[in-house]
């Protein structure tokens, strides 16, 4: 079927389709030439060009029947004679003669069907059929039998001079037939080899060109990298430009807020935060806390919180620059909740692991300010942040005071012990009523809030145990929570992602209840 389709295409429309593909290819190139195409888009267009060209080449190979490398296993076959009369009960076929070692009797056919006896030879070109009713083979004469005949590459004439063929005549004819067939096969093999060599050459050539068109050369990449190097800015250069933008006299509030937000992204890195101090940008940010625009206050506090986090050098510079007093003032006065959230973030970053700043914070009334913020109805969302800050300050001093914290105590360790000794947070919390403020968070429905409240209760236990024992409401609440988390911990055991969270809270509750009793 494929052979018939290919012959039909090649006979009627093969060259037309090939020409159509070529026209489409030319149209594509013409459109590419007419458009304003960037340099980076040309590799893609070149790739499309070679893809279309390769498809056209494969199509032409299919249409025009490039010989196959596979050779026929036999040069003779059973063929159906064209022009034979159809019959419902008979089958008609053209069969090859069998060669015997003895002489064969040649049957002389006529124009009528005759029965063929066993052992009789049939002249070439005769019509032979099998009569399904009688089971015998029948032969008749083909009007074209005695003429010169050709069937593809097969040709010859009928031998009617001799009534029979000898064995020698048959052997000689077969020998000559085989030699002619071998020569034709060798010729076909040679042509097929040439066609396939050309096909694979152009196929891999087009494929290689297409692949190369999809990528740029090393020289082009080097050129692009050189151009990028000219435009590349270091973090220090970016921060210098942002500080200049923020400090410009004609800069609008939006421009200054944008500069601060970009700075906040950079100062997360320790080195960048220290560079901001060296270039004088930290002083500008601290001064922005005094701005009358709440957006600048919020953005400046955000930058400070990111720069101060786990950066001792910047923490020292900020305390010396008077930032602690300004942050406490912002928390103590009437400000939007978004501003107070960022200011509390900056205070937490400044006080953590910095006992000197903690001591100054207590002297400036920071604990009292946190108590007022905790009691404020407008700042209920900040309560967890407040007690988390107090818990961190309590636990830091406890950890540093424990023996064996540093395997090899040095001078810096002794200095930290001395500084933490000056932070008297426990008595101040008990004095200002935090023993009754922290238990209020246990009534929250959020598990995280309850967990932080329980940890803070345990940290404050040495100075608040008496208050806890006298609080009947707290005792009842702890017992109710204990029963609730026992059920939650039991149900948690059957889950695949069991992380033991409820069991951990239950252990905290058991410890608090035990110490209160």
Image (tube, rainbow, N blue to C red):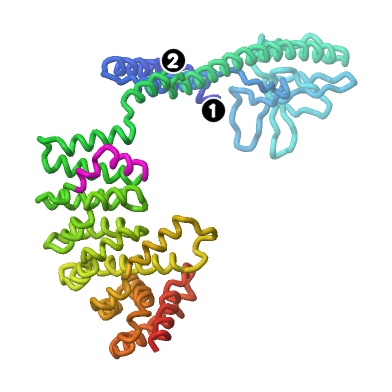
* The one of 13 and 108 positioned closer to us in this rendering: 13
* Observer able to see residue 126: yes
Q: Which residue is tagged 2?
A: 15
Q: Which residue is tagged 1?
A: 2
* The one of 47 and 432 positioned closer to us in this rendering: 432
Q: Which residues are magenta?
A: 270-286
Q: Regarding mark 2 in the picture, which secondary structure is present there?
A: helix
x, y (%) of residue 27?
A: 32, 17
Quadrant in which residue 127 is drawn: top right
Residue 74, compared with residue 87, is above or below; it is above
x, y (%) of residue 119?
A: 84, 26
Residue 373, compared with residue 349, is above or below; it is below
Query: Which quadrant would the N terminus be assigned to in this image?
Result: top right
Residue extending farthest to the right is: 102
Comparing labels 2 and 1, the label whose residue is closer to the camera: 2
Magenta stretch, main secondary structure class: helix
């Amino acid at each position: 079927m494929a052979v018939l389709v290919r012959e039909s295409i090649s006979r009627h429309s093969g060259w037309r389709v090939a020409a159509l593909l070529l026209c489409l290819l030319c149209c594509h190139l013409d459109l590419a030439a007419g458009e304003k195409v960037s340099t980076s888009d040309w590799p893609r267009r070149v790739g499309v060009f070679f893809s279309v060209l390769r498809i056209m080449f494969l199509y032409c190979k299919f249409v025009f029947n490039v010989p196959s490398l596979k050779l026929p296993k036999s040069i003779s076959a059973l063929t159906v004679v064209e022009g034979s009369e159809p019959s419902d009960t008979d089958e008609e076929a053209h069969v090859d003669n069998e060669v015997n070692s003895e002489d064969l009797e040649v049957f002389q056919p006529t124009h009528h069907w005759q029965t063929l006896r066993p052992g009789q030879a049939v002249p070439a070109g005769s019509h032979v059929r099998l009569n399904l009713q009688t089971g015998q083979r029948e032969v008749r004469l083909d009007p074209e039998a005695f003429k010169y005949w050709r069937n593809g590459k097969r040709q010859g004439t009928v031998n009617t001079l001799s009534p029979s063929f000898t064995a020698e005549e048959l052997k000689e004819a077969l020998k000559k037939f085989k030699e002619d067939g071998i020569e034709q096969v060798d010729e076909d093999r040679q042509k097929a080899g040439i066609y396939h060599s050309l096909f694979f050459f152009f196929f891999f050539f087009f494929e290689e060109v297409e692949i190369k068109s999809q990528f740029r050369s090393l020289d082009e990449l080097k050129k692009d990298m050189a151009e990028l190097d000219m435009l590349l800015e270091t973090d220090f250069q970016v921060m210098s430009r942002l500080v200049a933008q923020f400090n410009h006299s004609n800069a609008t509030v939006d421009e200054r807020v944008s500069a601060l937000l970009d700075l906040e992204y950079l100062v997360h890195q320790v080195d960048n935060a220290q560079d901001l101090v060296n270039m004088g940008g930290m002083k500008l940010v601290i001064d922005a806390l005094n701005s009358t625009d709440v957006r600048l206050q919020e953005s400046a506090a955000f930058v400070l919180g990111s720069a101060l986090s786990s950066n001792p050098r910047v923490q020292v510079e900020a305390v010396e620059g008077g930032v602690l007093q300004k942050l406490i003032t912002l928390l103590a006065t009437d400000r939007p909740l978004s501003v107070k959230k960022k200011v509390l973030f900056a205070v937490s970053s400044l006080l953590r692991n910095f006992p000197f700043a903690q001591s100054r914070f207590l002297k400036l009334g920071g604990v009292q300010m946190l108590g007022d913020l905790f009691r404020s109805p407008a700042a209920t969302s900040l309560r967890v942040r407040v007690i988390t800050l107090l818990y961190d300050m309590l636990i830091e001093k406890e950890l540093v005071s424990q023996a064996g914290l540093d395997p090899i105590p040095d001078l810096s360790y002794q200095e930290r012990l001395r500084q933490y000794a000056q932070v008297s947070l426990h008595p101040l919390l008990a004095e200002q009523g935090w023993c009754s403020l922290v238990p209020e968070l246990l009534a929250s429905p959020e598990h995280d809030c309850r967990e932080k409240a329980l940890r803070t209760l345990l940290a404050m236990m040495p100075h608040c145990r008496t208050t806890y024992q006298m609080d009947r409401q707290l005792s009842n609440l702890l017992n109710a929570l204990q029963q609730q988390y026992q059920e939650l911990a039991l149900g948690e055991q059957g889950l695949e992602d069991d992380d033991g969270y409820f069991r951990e809270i239950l252990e905290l509750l058991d410890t608090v209840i035990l110490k209160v009793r």
